[in-house]
Amino acid sequence: MISECLPFLPEVLPSFRPCPPAHDRAGWETLPPAAKKRLMAAGAAEAAKPLPALPLSLWLDFARTGKRSEWEEACFARRARLCALAAAECVEYQGRFLDAIADTVWAICEESAWQLPAHNSYVRDTPQLPLPDTARPLIDLFAAEAGALLSTVHYLLGAELEQAYPGLATRMEREVRARILTPYLRDHFWWMGNRDEPMCNWTSWCTQNVLLCFFLLPDVSQEERRDAVRQAAYSLDCFLKDYGPDGCCNEGAQYYRHAGLTLWGALRILSSAAPEAFGPVFREEKIRNIAEYILNVHVDGPYYLNFGDCSPLAGRCGAREYLFARAVGSPALEALAAADFRADPDPDRLTAQDASSRINLWYRLLTAFTQREMMDCPDPGPAPAGDVWYPSVGIFAARRGSWVLGAKMGGNGDSHNHNDTGSVTVYKDGCPFLIDVGVESYTRKTFSPQRYEIWTMQSGWHNLPTFDGVMQLPGAAYAARDIRVGEGCISAELSGAYPPIRGLGSYRRTVSVTEEGVALSDRTDWDGEVELTLMTQRRPQLSPGGLALEDLGVIRISSGAEISLQPVPVEDPRLRTAWPDTLWKISIYFYKSLDLFLE
């Protein structure tokens, strides 16, 4: 799709102008006062903090213990600091922040490597090397982010930095060229695509930020830009081949921000350089479907239907979703993004648990310069009742009255997969009823052969059955079959998601939603006792005919089933961003058939 545009490239590919540079005072004066105040406050706060240290011992923490968080927090804190300082200087333009900006730029330029320790390997899915090879730069997600950040700062304040600190802007260009431009044109990194090899959010995410480097730095030749555009087009086609026509993100709502939105980012840069060549791509139905995925899995307020490594609190929409909606012509997504922005107390993600969400200066600039439009956009109103079915991944969403039902009826071969085929999530009045827990903080184990030893990755901790201790297995071969979709209803055969179990030929799940509630019906030919797990946020209590979930509702259970309740302490910092200190695991033991009704 994207490579087909290459014959229509213009003779000259101009630089990208994401917003006015700092010296364009008229351009910066157009910012709303609230945006200026927010950017200034963030800059002042960062100026008062010390520059985070990144010693070798911290890098080696991953190789020695498998922990990622301390290096990443310090690394991302440096970059978030530079974002805030640069934006504040552009607003005020009095030189007050230049020393702190220069110190931070210098520190980033002095880093031995820009990739994360957890990404320090040159071949996909191979063990990470203990130390970075400074003679062989590696472009991972966050090397590309660092290059994009320095390139954006250079675009905004390069002349001012060069005047105050002669040679600093030149150093920035040299580092970005050595670590990003040259390796991108010379080497092949797995995320760049290789025919049928499956890609993920890395492809669009890295490509977007590499393109920022090529089109923001001033001394990049036309030949280099054309070569970069050709490679980017190929990579984006490799990324798009793994999306079905329906546009469903198999990594979930949280990763839509790193996948669908960075696809938009890459296309925005390309279409800015060559509007006649790449502008028409936004009119493709598949691109529109990719954009609207986040709209269709939105529940209410901050909540999204989640699966895999995604959190139910996947982050509010904002400027990028708004601009993607405008590009593809989606008034509903445009309205949701604007309403979400207006309701967001932290649109720059300054307090987000995921520190990597605040290290891209371009995103911060987009938010500031789009704020006025988003404030004036009409409210979307209540979400209409309706169903969405994504056959490419097996995601079903249905809304009736105060109820929202989500189901994953695909397979266990998705990127960021949990063994959760057949699992359902339910919301009532915008509150979690049956939940998908999500994922703990990433460690070395998370993306290793030991991934499915982690409890949050196991089907027994989702809203699914277990057969005498046997749970689902990972891989595309373990999938739902005979999927039937009706109005407010979905049904599938789930036995294929499990390894062969003697005597198990069928386990069929049917789930439906009406304005009265959600009905779940499970039928099996297995002769043994089935343990069905239900995960809840609210504390369940036994009541006549089933369970009561505090002030939220009840679960009515067909007769003949036994029930046990287990508190699940939540201690992991990442999980605690979405959940209270205790969740609940409900185990329902039954033979042959079970009917539940949530009301």
Image: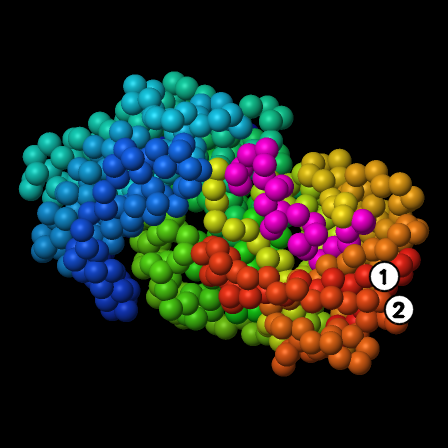
Q: Which mark is residue 5?
A: none
In the image, what residue type sits under mark 1? Answer: Phe
Q: Residues within 10 Å of mark 1 (few under 14, many from 20)?
A: some
Relative to residue 219, is residue 39 depicted above or below? Answer: below
Q: Is residue 389 visible?
A: no
For this rendering, which residue is in front, 319 or 358? Answer: 358
Contact, mark 2 vs mark 1 (Cβ under 8 Å)? yes
Amino acid type, residue under disc 2 in the picture? Gly
Q: Quadrant of residue 523?
A: bottom right
Query: Where 550 falls versus 10 (above or below)?
Result: below
Q: Is residue 259 magenta?
A: no
Asked whether 449 falls inside the magenta stretch, the response is yes
Please provide percent x and percent y for residue 134.
Answer: 29, 23
Magenta stretch?
445-468
Q: Secondary structure at mark 1?
A: strand
Disc 2 designates what residue?
Answer: 560
State the residue at coordinates (72%, 48%): 421
Please say whether residue 74 is visible from this viewpoint: yes
| SS of the residue under disc 2 | loop
What residue sits right under mark 1 in the picture?
Answer: 590
Horizontal relation, residue 238 to residue 534: left or right = left
Q: Earlier in the sequence, mark 2 or mark 1?
A: 2
> Mark 2 packing: few (<14 Cα in 10 Å), some, or many (20+)?
few
Instruction: Report x, y in % for residue 347.
Output: 37, 62
From the viewer's perspective, is 485 left or right of 246? right
The quarter of the image holding the C terminus is bottom right
